[in-house]
Image (tube, rainbow, N blue to C red):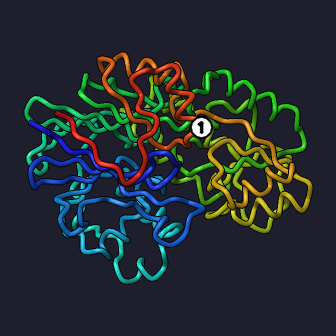
Amino acid sequence: MTLEVELAGGFGEKGRTSVVIGHGKNRVMLDAGIKVGASGRDYYPRPLTPIDQLDAVLISHAHEDHVGALNWLLSQGFRGRILMTRETRDEAPATLEAYAEKELLVAHPFPADRIELFQPGDVLDVAGFRIYTGRSGHVVGGVWFALEYGARRVVYCADVVPDSAVFVMDAMPECDLLLLDASYGADPISGSERAQHIKKWIAARAGGCLLPTPLSGRSLELIAAMPGHFAIHASMRQHLLAQTEAVDALKPGMPQLLRARIHAALDWTDGEKLPDCPLLADDGMGRAGPSSHLIPLADAQGFPILLSGHLPTGTPGYLLHEKGRADWIRMPTHPTLSGNLAIWEGCGRPPVLGHSCGPEEIARLGETIPALQSKRRVGERLLVE
């Protein structure tokens, strides 16, 4: 039995993460992201299968590089099944509002009535595949997928965090092909070490600072690492508290700790004086949400800014960092080198492709993982036989 794997986005690049896996005439798409910083056709995935022939799309989580092309898929004639967790369904409309083309939002709004829900850990039957799911350790409701057909199995990590201090990640099964979250390439520095660097940076700025962050995932990682009192943009409070209710996604003791810290946090609203403590505001790049106006405000007032995630070229965070007016310390929300090595070994050391990573970084990761096919790029098709 043979499986076909189409690299529709995210291979040799960061963004528009998307993979199509098929057998016979059946095809399913895993994730449909957009590429922040790109324009035109390069903003969207490039599947080789015509979109109106896809049987289903399964979304791993609601970040823009995994769900941002959903409206576009609908505009291209997609009529198949749409599957995601409840948390992803609840968060996706806000992501699409920020990152989808406005005319597509109007013509092809979020199809709430078509969404089929599942829980992390469920086993799904889709287009002849048996699809295993597990908690990703990346965000509440985030999952990885393992697609099985006959004797063949492909594991798609999506975004995972093996050493998260906050979220639980389930072990992935052995497989014939592993599509690995290579977002950080061969970065050897652990999440706990980076968290200590962030604590020291914050502690050295007693007069306050701005920390742009995605609304889900990294926000809770930062809150768990916060060295003292802090403020949040008021619009974030209910969403952050809702994430702490997903106790199965969080490590023991974390729901109580996070809720206590969020309840103790100050509310900051637009128009107020910048606080004399750390201020968290979404999103992490400054392209959408409150941080889109808070970043230029903080810059104009000389208020320190710490960026802690991916900065696509041309985004406000990227431009400010390039000019030396914002600092950057990675808060790992993807696997570092040791984490990816452990994932590969746990999956039986299969052939590997890395997604969400540029050519130079993926080549360096290949020096540690010899089974990594580091030259694979968007637009290619390969067979698992």
Three-letter amino acid code at disc 1? Glu
Q: Position of residue 346 (x, y in %)?
A: 34, 17
Decide if residue 122 is on the left or right side of residue 134: left
At label 1, counting other C-alpha atoms closer than 10 Å, the crowd grade (few under 14, some 14-19, many 20 or more) is few
Q: Is residue 157 above or below residue 302?
A: above
3 relative position to 157: left or right: left
Q: Residue 245: where, in percent of width, then height? A: 42, 41
Report how many numbered discs are placed on residues in the image.
1
Q: Is residue 70 above or below residue 368?
A: below
Q: Which residue is mark 1?
A: 360
Q: Position of residue 283 (x, y in %)?
A: 62, 56
Dot 1: what SS?
helix
**Image quarter hosting the N terminus:** top left
Displayed quadrant of residue 271:
bottom right
- The structure residue drawn at horizontal position 77% and vertical position 44%, both measured from the top left corner, is 306
- Residue drawn at (92%, 54%), measured in percent from left and top? 302
Residue 360 visible, this angle: yes
> In terms of depth relative to the viewer, which is nearer, 206 or 316?
316
Q: Residue at x 55, y 69 (%)?
A: 39
Asked whether residue 86 appears in the rendered view, the answer is no
Q: Residue at x 72, y 36 (%)?
A: 329
Q: Is residue 306 left or right of residue 214?
A: right
Quadrant in the picture for the C terminus: top left
Where is residue 5 shown, x and y percent of the image?
A: 26, 45
Question: Measured along the vertical axis of the image, is residue 334 above or below residue 28?
Answer: above
| Position of residue 330 in the picture relative to residue 114 (left or right) | right
